[in-house]
Amino acid sequence: MGIKAVLFDFNGVIINDERIHEQLISEIMVEENMRPQPGEFRQICLGRSDRVCLKELFANRGRFPSDEYIAKLIARKSQAYREQLEQMTKLPTFPGLEDFIYKVRVAQWKMAVVTGAIRPEVELVLQRLKLASYFPVIVTGDDITTSKPRPDGYLLAVDRLNHKYPDLQLRPGECVAIEDTPAGIAAAKAAGIPVVGVANTFPFHMMQRQANWAVDYLWDLELDRIQQIYAAGS
């Protein structure tokens, strides 16, 4: 058994946009007469969908808006997010991303994105970065009702890759996930997918404790070594 596919998280792995999301969530909270608390965004929202993030932020204040109301807030936030990105001449990414994607392409492994972000945001970023053609499968928060740390997004990505490439016969254990948050690592592991934790958002020691492998930057990841481990069945 070897690696056949690499499944990427989006926010915190492909685009460095934590600051933007925290700002936009804080603006929504203020507009909704809720006072943002220090550290709350990182604790509740990182690695999770906007739907889950907003619901929990409201619930912590004893408020339980309808799904329709939450959907309107998400749409408003998404519009503001895309407007901010469109004002940037260069999108913020992480060191080693392009080099790593090149290595995956040379290895001829399939690639997919698995994220709680909504599809218009993901497609905008991938197009701006000229990476869209490398990701034939994208699973977003629009496709599933659950959020990481649940494994549903990862399992759906495997299913969609198999549908797109019937001869692939991909199993979760033949994938590797790239994640930057505890919620994302837990989601991939629950799907039976080994995980590389990249220390873009949380410190290296946290990634090291929770992921199968941990790196400071994607260019540190030795794909040949990981492939040998897979091939040996470890």
Image: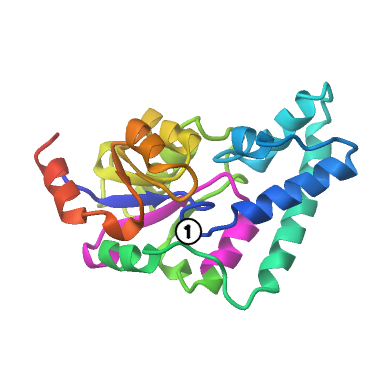
The residue labelled by disc 1 is 14
Q: Depth check: give the residue in front, 36 or 17.
A: 36
Q: What is the residue that sits farthest to the top in this orientation?
A: 62
Q: Is residue 228 above or below residue 210?
A: below
Q: What is the residue that sits farthest to the bottom in this orientation?
A: 89
Kindly identify the residue that appears in the image at 43 percent across and 42 percent down: 203
Q: Is residue 104 above or below residue 61?
A: below
Q: Is residue 98 above or below residue 157?
A: below
Whole-percent x and y of residue 85? 66, 67
Q: Depth check: give the residue in front, 119 or 189.
A: 189
Q: Depth check: give the residue in front, 215 or 144.
A: 215
Q: What is the residue that sits farthest to the left in this orientation?
A: 232
State which quadrant residue 158 falls in.
top left
Q: Is 179 on the left-hand or right-hand side of 17?
A: left
Kindly identify the residue that appears in the image at 50 percent across and 64 percent down: 93
Q: Is 147 on the left-hand or right-hand side of 197?
A: right
Whole-percent x and y of residue 227? 16, 49
Magenta-highlighted residues:
105-126
Whole-percent x and y of residue 159? 40, 43
- The number of callouts visible is 1
Q: Is 198 on the left-hand or right-hand side of 52?
A: left
Circle 1 SS class: loop
Residue 78 sits inside the magenta stretch? no
Q: Amino acid at mark 1?
A: Ile
